[in-house]
């Protein structure tokens, strides 16, 4: 067998691999066509608005109760009611826990208010990152969500420490 034939046979698979890689790179460069966003019907928007308003009332009530428990006059004073250090530590822990819960509840209220504004603007149910529709299943579970599952997963992956 001649030397030219041996070289061409050896290089043939490499050339095929290079073409495949080049094609893959070329395909990766092309952005995927954006799907046309199908807006929710007026009936569906009304359903989500009712859900959001009911959820808002419930969370506001929970927040008021948490704040009442944490920040009311039920805290011990300097009257010597709590002489045990363990009791004071427990009260401090409870207070910090309630502050964290109140913060989470307040964030949910803010998200609900944003979702209600989006219903008025006509942008409700559209992912803020990709501009694609958020699944109705996800909206039913979390009507205040602003991200699709794909965007949320990517956001969580980027937040994890490496």
Image (tube, rainbow, N blue to C red):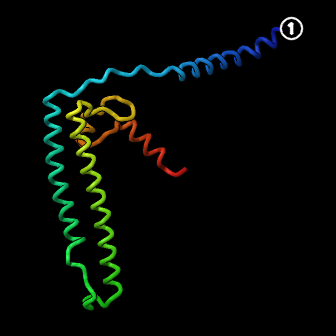
- At x 32%, y 63%, the residue is 100
110 displayed left or right of 27: left
The residue that label 1 is drawn on is 2
Q: Quadrant of the N terminus?
A: top right
Location of residue 96 by image quarter: bottom left
Q: As displayed, is residue 157 above or below residue 18?
A: below
- Nearest the viewer among 132 and 13 is 132
- At x 26%, y 23%, the residue is 38
Q: Residue 108 in the image: x percent, y percent?
A: 27, 51
- At x 53%, y 19%, the residue is 27
Location of residue 29 by image quarter: top right
Q: As displayed, is residue 154 above or below residue 16?
A: below
Q: Which SS class for mark 1?
A: loop
Q: Residue 74 in the image: x percent, y percent?
A: 20, 78
27 displayed left or right of 44: right
- Nearest the viewer among 121 and 158 is 121
Callout 1 crowding tier (Cα within 10 Å): few <14, some 14–19, many ≥20: few
Location of residue 53 by image quarter: top left
Q: Residue 44 in the image: x percent, y percent?
A: 16, 32
- Nearest the viewer among 74 and 139 is 74
101 displayed left or right of 57: right
Q: Residue 52 in the image: x percent, y percent?
A: 18, 44
Total numbered badges shown on the rendered structure? 1
- At x 34%, y 34%, the residue is 127
């Amino acid at each position: 067998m001649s030397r030219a034939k041996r070289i061409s046979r050896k290089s043939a698979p490499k050339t095929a691999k290079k073409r495949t890689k080049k094609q893959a790179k070329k395909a990766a460069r092309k952005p995927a066509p954006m799907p046309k966003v199908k807006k929710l019907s007026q009936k569906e928007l009304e359903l989500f608005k009712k859900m959001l308003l009911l959820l808002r009332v419930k969370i506001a009530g929970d927040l008021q109760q948490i704040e009442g428990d944490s920040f009311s006059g039920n805290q011990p004073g300097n009257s010597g009611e709590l002489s045990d250090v363990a009791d004071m530590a427990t009260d401090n822990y409870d207070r910090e826990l309630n502050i964290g819960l109140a913060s989470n509840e307040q964030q949910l209220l803010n998200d609900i208010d944003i979702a209600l504004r989006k219903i008025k603007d006509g942008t409700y149910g559209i992912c803020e990152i990709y501009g694609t529709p958020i699944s109705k299943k996800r909206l039913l579970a979390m009507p205040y969500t602003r991200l699709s599952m794909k965007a949320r997963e990517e956001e969580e992956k980027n937040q994890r420490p490496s």
